[in-house]
Amino acid sequence: METPNKFKILCIESTCDETAAAVITENREVLGSVVASQDDLHEQFNGVVPEIAARAHVQRIIPVIDQTLKNAELQLNDLDAIAVCNTPGLSGSLLVGVVAAKSLALACGLPLIAINHLHAHVYACQLESTEPVFPCVGMIVSGGHTHLYQYQNALTAQYLGGTIDDAAGEAFDKVASMLGLPYPGGPAVSQKAANGDPKAFDFPRSFIHDKNLDFSFSGLKTAVRYAIAGPGEVDFKTLEISEQKICDVSASFQQAVVDCLVKKAIAATKQTGLKTICVGGGVAANSSFREQLRQACDQNQLTLHIAPLKYCTDNAVMGAIAIERYKAGLFESLELDIQPGLIRH
């Protein structure tokens, strides 16, 4: 595929449990994209097992990159740079992606670009927008992250607040497990919530009236546990819960999460004076959250950009933020290291 006068970047994503690669041009055209999910490997554990994730990345990283290049109808020597997420994430998973990227950069004599996974989630909002989305309040809501940032531009961000315990997506997974629903929990809980009463249970909404921009979902998770089984020891695998109760708990839990997310997102705009909100991450695919946040933005005369559904969960296309770093000449040496963990300010 000929793309004259357009630089092309191979982006690699392996921060958690998706092995992904994409080729992006300077005008954000996606020439090829492949995502290899590991949901089937982690389902029996109701969450991601780091060692299993890392081993799966080792097996899949080269085939995923190879298939991406085939889809793009390109060879390695057609590329202009290699980009990779090196933070934040699971140590073993990050290491696989970074080693692959550094090896390709060295072998092909190409510049290496480092990507922050969180900021890439926010940049996903720019992918299909015909207008600039920055400056903005950026919200990342996923299995491991619930954070707010103030963005001056795509590459300049100030941390505003985030979860002090469970992330929203993690809470969805844990509640789904208690209700006997499949992993990943977000889609499963949302499906049941559609047939439930969001006012059936008065679950807590931690920090919702506080001036800070932090979140907490551990108390909500515990309240759900008591609503399902009461205090004391319980074997959730044998616990019998009526279908209606599953739906009502799901709806009430989801509403509590959505209330907190929407309230803090709007509060962040008031504190920063910004009039635009950008949202990315797996939980951004939740239809109730998307609709209620859109209504709140309309009421407050704010512009809302939410990542396209296909780019909410982890993928390499959101690595298009590397375009901005390429243009700014922000390249890395082959000494680039991983920075694991949950928060990278």
Image (cartoon, grey):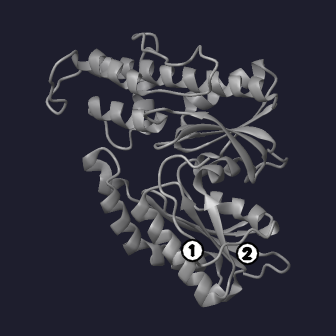
Q: Residue at x 78, y 20 (%)?
A: 300
Question: Under tag 1, what secondary structure?
Answer: helix
Label 2 Cα crowd, 10 Å radius (few <14 / some 14-19 / many 20+): many
* Front: mark 2 or 1: 2
Measuring from the top left, give residue 198's x and y in whole percent: 46, 15
Measuring from the top left, give residue 317's x and y in whole percent: 63, 61
Label 1 Cα crowd, 10 Å radius (few <14 / some 14-19 / many 20+): many
Q: Residue at x 56, y 22 (%)?
A: 260
Residue beneath disc 1: 68
Measuring from the top left, give residue 283's x and y in whole percent: 53, 38
Residue beneath disc 2: 8
Examine the image and state in which quarter residue 115 appears. bottom right
Q: Is residue 47 left or right of residue 97?
A: left
Q: Is residue 241 left or right of residue 57?
A: left
Q: Which quarter of the rendered picture does the N terminus lie within? A: bottom right
Q: Is residue 28 in view from this perspective? A: no
Q: Is residue 320 in view from this perspective? A: yes
Q: Residue at x 50, y 20 (%)?
A: 255
Query: Residue 228 — which label?
Result: none
Q: Earlier in the sequence, mark 2 or mark 1?
A: 2
Question: Under tag 2, what secondary structure?
Answer: strand
Q: Is residue 82 left or right of residue 173?
A: right
Q: CA distance from mark 2 to mark 1?
A: 13 Å
- Amino acid type assigned to the residue bearing label 1 in the image: Thr
